Image: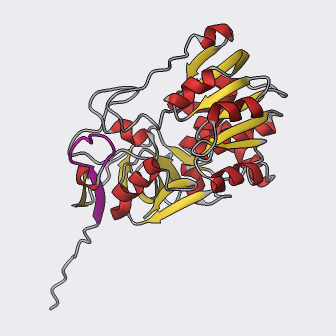
Amino acid sequence: MYLVRTIRLIMKNQQIVLVRRPEGMASPDDFSLKTVDMPDIEEGQILVKNEYLSLDPAMRGWMNEGTTYMPGVQIGSVMRGFGAGKIVASKHDDYPEGSYITGLFGVQEYAVSDGKGTTLIDQINEPLSYHLGILGMPGMTAYFGLLEKGQPEAGQTVFVSGAAGVVGSTVGQIAKIKGCTVVGTAGSKEKCRYLIEECGFDAAINYKEEDLEASIKAACPDGVDVFYDNVGGPMLDTMLKNLARGARVVICGAISQYNKSEIYGPKNYMKIVTARGYITGIIVFDYINQYPKAVKEMSQWIAEGKLKTKEHVVDGIEHFPAALQMLFKGQNFGKLSLKI
């Protein structure tokens, strides 16, 4: 007589947990690497194995207490973040096992979801990591922020701050596709070369070495019709002095301000009156129902060689705190993500 034992394999899940709210730039002490058992999924749920996790400037705001366009991450909770991965178990009819998917799955190896707010990837024509970058939230931010908010017209001048990042470089390339003159700023000669030689920008300004205002006037003699701002601070103040009549200023981010306790407000805001223009903001989640259309069009541009991207991938979830600091120190070159 044989004794038959059933051995249940207990899956483990590594998570990055927020343990305190940062003061200034987030540090490794603000996070903890935690290992927990994997919960069973219930009816209407899926289990996703993340393959890539996105690092985005918005994460710094999510660590603050209170609510902006979404509540801050609670102390002791998994750090909020976008993931791209594979459905390894499903009890949801609309999300078959084996499918690839993206969503706010958190900075962890595995995530349980009911499918709300996620995006199924119909086909993988590009690397999966692209769906966290140029075909993910940053790319959608660029697409809708420029086309819906900036409304560029052929022949106009589009200026992009923080242009070497995935949002900025995508904005510039879409503007070129639409027939615009495109100028951007970046923080190194290498990044400026990338914008001109790879992304097709007409000019790129190294704000760390050049006179910003003089360079803007030289590159945009008739003023700027669309200013897409990812930086904020003095950069925004300078740009407001160089607007063309009817200019649109699209505020996407203010990475220069995220780690500061006092926010720098624009001194030249009345220039928007002189220009008879407007300032608007972009929150990409407002367009989530339109993502499939944008992804399809941008995938076609990628296939045609009209849209390019650069990636910076760090291996290992344990490197999340250090990688996040890279983002705010400008040490990454391309879309920053973690490979799990």
Quarter in which the C terminus is drawn: bottom left
What is the number of callouts on the image?
0
Q: Position of residue 39 (x, y in %)?
A: 26, 56
Q: Horizontally, is 329 left or right of 178 in the view?
A: left
- Residue occupying the point 37% across, 40% down: 60
In this rendered view, identify the residue nearer to me: 168 or 96: 168
- Residue occupying the point 25% across, 45% down: 77
In this rendered view, identify the residue nearer to me: 254 or 281: 254
Q: Horizontally, is 54 left or right of 226 in the view?
A: left
- Would residue 132 be visible to someone looking at this image? yes
- Residue occupying the point 56% across, 42% down: 138
Depicted 235 relative to depicted 164: above or below: above
State yes or no: residue 20 in magenta.
Answer: yes
Quarter location, residue 7: bottom left
In this rendered view, identify the residue nearer to me: 206 or 121: 206
Q: How is the image coloured?
A: secondary structure
Depicted 99 relative to depicted 171: above or below: below
Quarter in which the N terminus is drawn: bottom left
Q: Position of residue 169 (x, y in %)?
A: 66, 44
- Would residue 95 be visible to someone looking at this image? no
Q: Position of residue 43 (x, y in %)?
A: 35, 47
Q: Position of residue 38 (x, y in %)?
A: 27, 59
Q: Horizontally, is 94 left or right of 17 in the view?
A: right
Quarter location, residue 260: top left
What are the residue bounds of the magenta stretch? Answer: 12-26
In this rendered view, identify the residue nearer to me: 30 or 284: 30
State yes or no: residue 128 in magenta.
Answer: no
